[in-house]
């Protein structure tokens, strides 16, 4: 079963990108992966087809936080989950204050990730 919501994963580590995409696809989600913020921002179709963004903080080039700010300027209330292997409570609060759904440390708690995704999609459906 393929769900209509497309999740965009932005991480410069190939193993993280492919691992997250494979995991999300195994649960029925459509995915699209990018290795940089710049690559995502250059793809207008991906920007507008995305129902959720999973963004690593530490990217080559533009940071994940800079990317999320750019998404906020282009899209209305983009749902995003910010991830990092080196995060702390300050990053959590910064991500939340930017408007992200949550901040998650790597390695990612898969059950919690899916819980956040389900909540985000159910609240999007309720607004429509």
Image (cartoon, grey):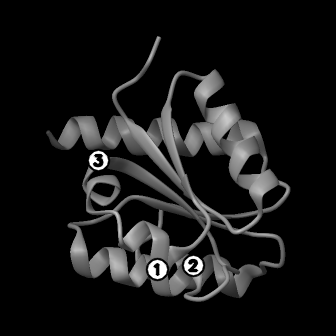
User: From the viewer's perspective, is residue 6 above or below residue 73?
Assistant: above
Q: Position of residue 86 (x, y in %)?
A: 83, 78
- The residue mark sitting in front, 3 or 2, is 3
- Asked if the residue under mark 1 is in contact with the one under mark 2, i.e. CB atoms within 8 Å, the reply is yes
The reply, left or right, for residue 29 in relation to residue 121 is: right
* Image quadrant in which you'd find residue 73: bottom left
Q: Which residue is mark 2?
A: 64
The Cα atoms of the two marked residues, 3 and 1, are separated by 17 Å
Q: Position of residue 110 (x, y in %)?
A: 75, 40
The Cα atoms of the two marked residues, 3 and 2, are separated by 19 Å
Q: Secondary structure at mark 2?
A: helix
Q: Which residue is mark 3?
A: 49
The reply, left or right, for residue 75 in relation to residue 2 is: left
Q: Which residue is mark 1?
A: 67
Q: Looking at the rendering, in which quadrant would you find the C terminus?
A: top left
Q: Secondary structure at mark 1?
A: helix
Q: Position of residue 68 (x, y in %)?
A: 44, 76
* Image quadrant in which you'd find residue 12: bottom right
User: From the viewer's perspective, is residue 99 above or below residue 22?
Assistant: below
Q: Residue at x 34, y 28 (%)?
A: 4
Earlier-in-chain disc, 3 versus 2 = 3
Q: Residues within 10 Å of mark 3 (few under 14, many from 20)?
A: some
Q: Residue at x 70, y 33 (%)?
A: 23
For this orientation, the residue located farthest to the left is 128
User: From the viewer's perspective, is residue 34 above or below residue 63?
Assistant: above
Q: Residue at x 73, y 81 (%)?
A: 89
User: From the viewer's perspective, is residue 75 above or below residue 79?
Assistant: below
The reply, left or right, for residue 1 in relation to residue 110 is: left
Earlier-in-chain disc, 3 versus 1 = 3
Q: Residues within 10 Å of mark 2 (few under 14, many from 20)?
A: many
Q: Position of residue 69 (x, y in %)?
A: 39, 83
């Amino acid at each position: 079963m393929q769900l209509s919501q497309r999740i965009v994963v932005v991480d410069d580590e190939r193993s993280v990108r492919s691992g997250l995409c494979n995991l999300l696809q195994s649960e029925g989600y459509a995915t699209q992966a990018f290795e940089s913020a710049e690559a995502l921002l250059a793809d207008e179709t991906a920007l507008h087809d995305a129902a959720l963004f999973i963004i690593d903080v530490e990217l080559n080039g533009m940071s994940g936080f800079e990317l999320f700010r750019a998404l906020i300027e282009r899209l209305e209330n983009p749902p995003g989950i910010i991830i990092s292997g080196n995060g702390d409570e300050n990053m959590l609060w910064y991500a939340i204050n930017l408007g992200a759904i949550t901040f998650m440390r790597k390695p990612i708690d898969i059950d919690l990730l899916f819980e956040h995704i389900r909540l985000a999609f159910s609240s999007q459906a309720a607004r429509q």
